[in-house]
Amino acid sequence: MPIIRVEMLAGRTLEQKSELAEVLTRETARIARCTLTDVQIVFDERAHASWAVGGRLVSDHATAHAEKN
């Protein structure tokens, strides 16, 4: 049974996660030739202060962006 772990920054709506789950499930089942109920998806959301890109915390990017505007 396919298990998909999705790590992403916190802040997505339930509707967004639901749509993502639907599409990932459908396409994974099609490609893996399994049933929809065989596919499991785990959303692992991280705080902006717990994720870094380019050596800087994402929360720092957001603060710098807000200060420019």
Image (spheres, rainbow, N blue to C red):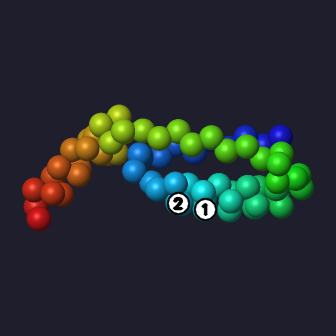
Indicate left or right for 16 with 55 as reference.
right
Secondary structure under tag 1 reads helix
Residue 1 vertical position relative to residue 69 in the rendered view, above or below = above
Q: Which residue appears at 15% of the width and 57% of the height?
A: 66
Which residue type carries mark 1? Glu
**Which residue is at the front of the view, 7 or 43?**
43
The residue that appears at 57% across and 43% down in the rendered structure is 43
Q: Position of residue 25 (x, y in %)?
A: 73, 55
> Which residue is found at the position 35% from the left and 34% from the top?
50
Crowd rating for badge 2 (residues with CA inside 10 Å; few <14, some 14–19, many 20+): few
Which mark, by number, is residue 19?
1
The residue positioned farthest toward the front in the image shown: 14
Q: Residue furthest top?
A: 50
Q: Which mark is residue 16?
A: 2
Residue 38 position within the rendered picture, expressed as x and y whole percent measured from the top left: 83, 45
- Report if the CB atoms under discs 2 and 1 are less than 8 Å apart: yes
CA distance for labels 2 and 1: 5 Å
Q: Residue at coordinates 30% horizontally, 45% vertically from top-left?
A: 58
The residue type indicated by label 2 comes to Gln
Q: How far across and how far down the image is residue 30, in percent?
A: 83, 61
